[in-house]
Amino acid sequence: MDFLAEAFRRAWGLLLAGDSEVYGIALLTLKVAVVATVISCAVGLPLGYFLATRRFWGRRAALTVVNTALAFPTVVVGLLLYGLLSRRGPLGSLGWLYTWQAIVIGDVLLALPIAAALSAAAIQGVDPRIRRTAETLGAGSWRTAWTVAREARFALAAVITAAFGQVVAEVGAAMIVGGNIRGSTRTLTTAVALYTSQGDFGLALALGVVLLMLALVVNIALQMLQGRVVLDLDQFAVPRTGILGVVGHNGAGKSTLLRLLALLEAPTEGQVFWDGVVVPRRPPAALRRRVTLVEQRPILFRGTVRENLVYGLAIRGIGRSAVNGMIGHVVEELGLQTLLGRRRHELSDGEVQRVAVARALALRPDVLLLDEPASSADRAAAGALYRALAAERAARPLAVCIASHQLEDAYRWADDIRALAEGRLSPVTPENLFRVDLPAGDGVKHARVGNVAIVVLTDRTGPAVLAIPPTDIFVSRERLPASARNVLSGRVTGMAIERFGAGVHVRADVGGVELVAAITAEAARDLALAPGGAVVFSFKATAVRVF
């Protein structure tokens, strides 16, 4: 122990004193590693893309060769390269033997298979529809490749990290073709091996610490380039029963929130509680089985629809007779009788969603999480889905959390609505949605929203929600003769330009009620609208949606 303690003291002394030999070796190692990583990735990433996306004779053999090269012993690579660069070798005229350039070549030969094989796997993991969509929209080969690479950017960053790790830790080839010459080709790994064999354990340990720090700094830098805050919530509670709707635009953080609630991911900061008890970062299986998530693009396993419905129940050890009853109920609720014998490739996207929801309902979880469950369904199928959820809630205690960007569905079926914007809970209620009490009678009705009477055409009575699409509101500076039954005067309270500048959202106070209209940027200029200015909003009774 005294030997190790003394070695550590000397190592830290050399590092803190800025020993020229230690840092000189570190700088050479960094230079070699960066150059070798850049070359290997510049060649390996395009090669991996080519192997992943192109079909050609010998492709399988090429992939086999690349994957086999992952296991090449470094000393064998160094030996072969020594033969090529020696005076009697075919590349001896270059005079690169025992130079840092020779070490770079050896490192490239070792890192290139890693870059190619792992990038091919990363590209194959990208949804093939990304490439097809880019090509359909007219993108050329290079633009398509760039589009696909952007989708796999995090995986490709991991590939670059792996290539750098191979290069910076390599010792066999560097020792053979570099010669471990002091001040010329001595890298951190070869120096550690040399000083350890000479008994200078303190210096070897100092170099080892520098090597670890170098690898750590590079990995942290790559992680910082990848990372971004997707969700930032002070707190978010799901009620024990009822349907909670989470609305927001694409990228607002809805799917990430559902994965956290499903205990599939742990937050980078903060904690998840279940019944007031902190959930460990690796939750027990018994706890995870109490919550089930159906993702936006659900996956069905190989086999028939029936086999997929039985999967989770079989894992829980439920007997066959009970299984038949449990899946029979959800099959009837969601109208899946004719699909039970089909396989996943025989189903439409909407049918896949229905099967996935049925598979989750059959498990009878305490919490059911649904990510855009009706995005691929027609109105009839969506109605059947929500009616099945209502029936399940009536039969037993069940908490349902639905993430959707379709505000109408959320307001139609949810007991509570929460909006997400840029990963944060938004205090702003989604636009032009109002809870009202509709009077009895058929046809045209007047619904009171604050001090304003909105004319609607509906047969509904009692509690309802009115939705007025911002695009259906006509904006003017004064009242104009028109057939619109709703003509509301007010003042502009705010204006917001859409993300890409194509339109403007005009927010106005009309009789104490805030409405939002969407118009083109050109129309906004022609009307010379400004906050505080007079404005008239007009819309037909048939434009008001009631649910």
Image: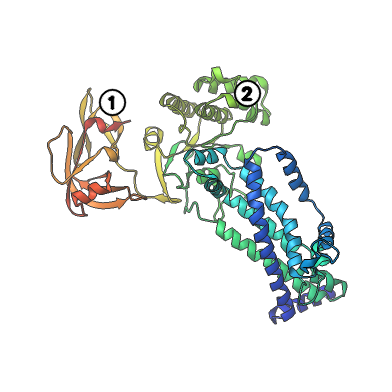
At 82% from the left edge and 70% from the top edge, which residue is drawn?
Answer: 179
For marks 2 and 1 on the same chain, the one whose residue lies earlier in the sequence: 2
Any part of residue 389 in sight: yes
Figure check: 312 above or below 94: above
Residue type at numbered disc 1: Arg
Instruction: Give the position of the N terminus as an image quadrant.
Output: bottom right
Q: What element does badge 2 sit on?
A: loop
Q: Which residue is mark 1?
A: 460
Which one is nearer the viewer's eye here, 454 or 27? 27
Residue 410 left/right relative to 125 = left
Which one is nearer the viewer's eye here, 81 or 280? 81
Q: Which residue is mark 2?
A: 304
At 55% from the left edge and 30% from the top edge, which residue is drawn?
Answer: 356
Instruction: Give the position of the C terminus as an image quadrant.
Output: top left
Residue type at numbered disc 2: Thr
Figure check: 72 above or below 352: below
At 27% from the left edge and 49% from the top edge, which residue is drawn?
Answer: 521
Q: Position of residue 208 (x, y in %)?
A: 76, 69
The image quadrant that residue 74 belongs to is bottom right
Q: Position of residue 205 (x, y in %)?
A: 78, 72
Q: Position of residue 389 (x, y in %)?
A: 47, 29
Figure check: 244 above or below 111: above
Which one is nearer the viewer's eye here, 43 or 29? 43
